[in-house]
Image: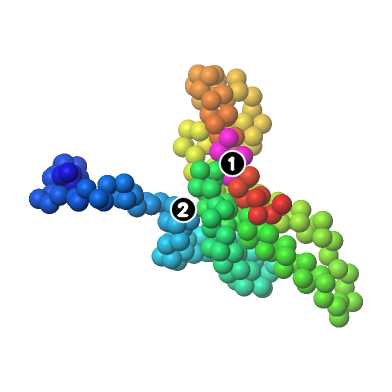
Amino acid sequence: MTMTVTSPKGLALETPWRIPSWTVGYIRPVPATLEERFVAGDELALREAFDEYGPLIIGLCRRLVGRDAEDVAQQAFVAAWNGRSRFDTGKGSLKSWLAGIARFKSIDHLRAINRRPQSTGAEPQDLGEMQADASRVTDRMVLTEALARLSDERRVVVELAFYGDMTHSEISDKLSMPLGTVKSHVRRGLETLRAELEVSHEQSS
């Protein structure tokens, strides 16, 4: 069979060679997205993920564990890499998944500190309070990032509905947008936000 490729200008070209018949069925598409390459075990994808999300994950850990943030963030990336087969690219973003693992590792770190002898005489932190704080910080970060990825129109509608506390009808009037479109934006926006939160919680439950 003749192999057909696409040129940079979108023109179909035929190569002057033929693909051996025995290769048919063995050729697989190369994973294209960072998430797919990460799950496939591409070590370059791990480096790219750290370059892309490292500062954000370190910042999250810093809010949760303070000066040990970089160590905990590194543990989160190592755990994500070792457990990459559990990440479902269809459920949510790699960023949200990493945030969930970072929260899990941060809580683990705080638990370990709490088990140490209290040489200063300070009272150990309440574990439930630590977990609640970690959840609030992570959820806020995940929601902010997820909102930023919505289309401009959908993001405005979702923000007016939940931060502006406006009804669908009020949003429709304010934006001169059909009521059905407003409802669709709110529903689909919520689905996106819920999916991101579920992914980030998988490693923290």
Residue under the point 15% across and 44% down: 2
Q: Dot 2: within a 10 Å radius of its alpha carbon, few (fewer than 14), some, or many (20 or more) residues?
A: many
Residue under the point 57% across and 60% down: 83
| 193 drawn magenta | yes
Q: Dot 1: within a 10 Å radius of its alpha carbon, few (fewer than 14), some, or many (20 or more) residues?
A: some
144 relative to 105, above or below: above
- Name the outermost residue toward the bottom: 119
Pointer 2 residue: 35
Task: Please say whether residue 13 is visible from this viewpoint.
Answer: yes
Indicate the position of residue 14 as horizontal and vertical percent values.
13, 45
Mark 1 is on which residue type? Ala
Indicate the position of residue 37 as horizontal and vertical percent values.
42, 56
9 relative to 133, above or below: above
| 60 drawn magenta | no
Secondary structure found at label 1: helix
Q: Which residues are magenta?
A: 191-196
Q: Is the N terminus in the top left, top right, bottom left or bottom right quadrant?
A: top left
In the picture, residue 198 is in which quadrant? top right
Which SS does the magenta portion mostly show? helix
